[in-house]
Image: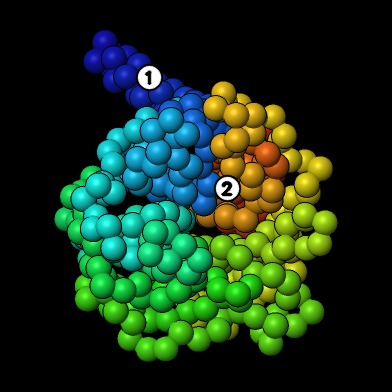
Amino acid sequence: MKNYTAIFFSLFLFLSCKSIPKKERISSWTNPIRKGINQYGMKDFFVFLEDEKYYVVGTEYSSPYKGYLGPVLYQSKNLSKWKKEIKLLNPNDIPVNAWYKDGWFAPEIKKIKNKYYFSFNNRNNAVNPYQKLGFGIAVSNELKGPYKVINTKTPLTLGNHGSLVVGENEDEIFLIYDNDARIYSVKVDIEKGILKNEPKELLGPETLGKNYKYLDAPQITKVGPVYHMLFSQFYGGYEVKVFHMTAIHPLGPWKWDDTNPLYSFLEAEADEVVKNKYPTRHGFAPPTQVVFSNQLFLGKNNQYFNAYHSSEKYSEPYLCIEPVEVDGDRIYIPTAKNKHQKEVIK
């Protein structure tokens, strides 16, 4: 009898423990996020998850006291507090006449075939300060480098916000970028750092028709079988709208989301408060005026987020992150543009 009692009691405890839900934790942050990243401003953020840690790179503004220190990789455990991890490339090691001497606009890091590819948009301000930005790729066997620039002689193409997109397999790599208010695509050999064909217009007046405006900053993220593209369009009066399209291949055809736009940013919303002390008043605070760069990325617990830089007018741009719900070819941002954000960690 005692044995049966012990068995029933053990079974009761087991079933009771199983019925208790696993405790959930709340991680919260306040947009814009400034702690730990470049205090003089960053934009065009690219966030990714690696070994349960978040990393970010972006267009950085130089210190007015020390000049530009080069592209930096930042790391965080919880999205709200960042720290400088490593300098990806040292500008002092780059030849003075190299085409990629200055800038490092809209950089990204993507893992392809067990290698890390650091891509960037750059130029040489001393040799040709008015040339359009060129696209470059550096490679490393490790996330934290060292990185070696592949196309040292010339940029792959001219444009901005260049982004590498993996196709149906890792042998099919595309470069998606904007140029002259249109979005282009081209196939890339990332190991050799060359184009496989001539760039072609992916989105423009003919493909978008009445929905076309000035196109900027395309970002493509694959969720399951669906490719999601976020991009911006500029309207008169300093109004920017962020749009969403989907496809089952990076080259399309791309389907317009009838719930567009995801966001609208107005000049009236812009922060005019300069947050740092500069040698002269407003002397170095970089005006961004509008929000262009939006990136859909996968975080912990299979939660998706959108990263963009804050709407600034005369002050420094900083990181904003918001949870995103993805359902097939639809995405929804429940707390869009809210100052306070949170995620549930299970």
Q: Is residue 11 above or below residue 289?
A: above
Dot 1 amino acid type: Leu
Mark 2: few/some/many CA within 10 Å (<14, 14-19, 20+): many
The answer to whether 8 is drawn above or below residue 68 in the figure is above
Nearest to the eye among marks 2 and 1: give it.
2
The residue most toward the top is 2
Alpha-carbon span between mark 2 and mark 1: 48 Å
Tag 2 secondary structure: strand
| Residue 308 tag number | 2
> Residue 275 in the image: x percent, y percent?
61, 26
Residue toward you, 232 or 91: 91
Crowd rating for badge 1 (residues with CA inside 10 Å; few <14, some 14–19, many 20+): few
Colour scheme in use: rainbow
Query: Where is residue 205 shown, x and y percent of the image?
Result: 70, 83
Residue named by callout 1: 13
Tell me if residue 46 can be seen: yes
Does residue 340 appear to the left or right of 196 in the view shown? right
Mark 2 residue type: Tyr
Q: Is residue 143 left or right of residue 43?
A: left
Instruction: Return the x and y of residue 241 as percentages of the image width and height.
Output: 73, 59
Instruction: Answer with left or right where residue 61 lies relative to residue 322.
Output: left
